[in-house]
Image: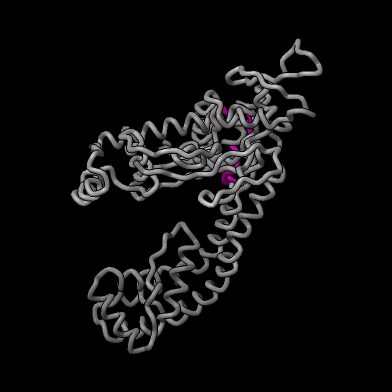
Amino acid sequence: MIIRMTSFSVDETSNQSCSSPVLGKRKSVKPPPSAWEHFIKVEGCDPKYPRAACKHCEASYACDSKRNGTTNLKRHLKKCKMYVNPLEDNVEGEGDSESSLMAASFTQENCRKMLARMVILDELPFKFVESEGFHQFCRALNPKFVIPSRVTVAKDCFQMYMKEKKKLKNALTRSGQRVCLTTDTWTSVQNINYMVITAYFIDDDWNLHKRILNFCQVANHKGDTIGRTIEKCLECWGIDTLFTVTVDNSNDVAIAYLVKKFKGRNGLVLDGEFIHIRCCAHILNLIVSDALKDLHVSIIRIRNAVKYVRSSPARLQIFKDFAKEDKMSTKNCLTMDVPTRWNSTFTMLDGAIKCQKTFERLEEHDPSYLPKDDIPITEDWDNAKVFVKFLKTFSERHSFVLRIGFSLNLWMT
């Protein structure tokens, strides 16, 4: 048995401090949301002695503003068995609002719960629980723990997901606050289309929350397909009130579809006139992509040079030896880019420029280097230097612009 010492609770209205040489001073506990959101005044009571009933368990308490205030209401809310804070991550043994002197004993159920939580938080494979090292660790920690199979752990993770999904759904539908959505679609290297939908909302305590509502495959990137996917996701979560939807500039069809579907439900502000928020990142991508067209050949040649060095361990070692002779560091200088992501192109060019002399030395000593038309020339390096200077401004401002745009979105909320 492990004895855990925690502080004793004290009435919030008391001015006396509660301390102990063993327990120390009581830590302040953040009060729950306004008590009157969860209580209703009981009719027919003596006006001198008003009472309020809990909306969850119907228990009644005195609520005279002069005698009791809302302290006893808040105290009840903390221990009400019928009320669950939908945004509070209640992990057993953590965040207990009511402190007590208690004994923490071993339970198979709690250990399985914490194991599933560890797998999710650390992104571990399910087969991790069947490894010999993990079995030895558990036997040394507590031989009573029966280690579940990977199938059982997968089921525990799914049950935890469904529980958290239910809590989030209650939070989104309980108070009826409006939700802001952001969407992103892309095509993987396996030529599969994916879409992610993220919701932003503010709770009763004015805390901002970000939750991924859906991550799924889509047939294509057309506006109708995106609009239907968003509508299906919102119906699944029971969301009827939208404030804004942030999508690419070219997705006017998806926005028109959502406005048409939600306009009759009174779920939009000003009939959806300002529901479409233009994606700042997409606008920057359009600007940079337009500039990339003029320097396309130079970028391709430098990309081929970096790819040639990275394609073989022997070539990479030769390149490092040449860089050492030139007293150059190859750290972060040979990174490949993703052609559709301009910031990765900036990182590749910025690193390759630092090793320009090493690439030129490799050209002189390696007979199997790139074909003559694919080798970067002096003009290509000069173009890359100018372009990196241009991209550096966007790279430094990119995250700042996104934060400003999102802050304005929240301010409008």
The C terminus - image quarter: top right
> Does the image show residue 155?
yes
Residue 393: percent from the left, percent from the top?
60, 68
The magenta segment is 239-253
302 relative position to 35: left or right: left
As drawn, 230 above or below 127: above
Residue reaching furthest left? 132
Residue 196: percent from the left, percent from the top?
48, 41
The colour scheme applied to this rendered structure is one colour
As drawn, 324 above or below 265: below
332 relative position to 280: left or right: left
Residue at coordinates 61% horizontally, 55% vertically from top-left? 402
Residue at coordinates 58% horizontally, 42% vertically from top-left? 209
As drawn, 355 above or below 200: below
Residue 214: percent from the left, percent from the top?
47, 37
As drawn, 175 above or below 206: above
309 relative position to 297: left or right: left
The N terminus - image quarter: top left
Give yes or no for residue 244 being in the magenta stretch: yes
Residue at coordinates 56% horizontally, 70% vertically from top-left? 392
Residue at coordinates 54% horizontally, 52% vertically from top-left? 21
Give yes or no for residue 72 being in the magenta stretch: no
> Does the image show residue 251?
no
Residue reaching furthest front? 21
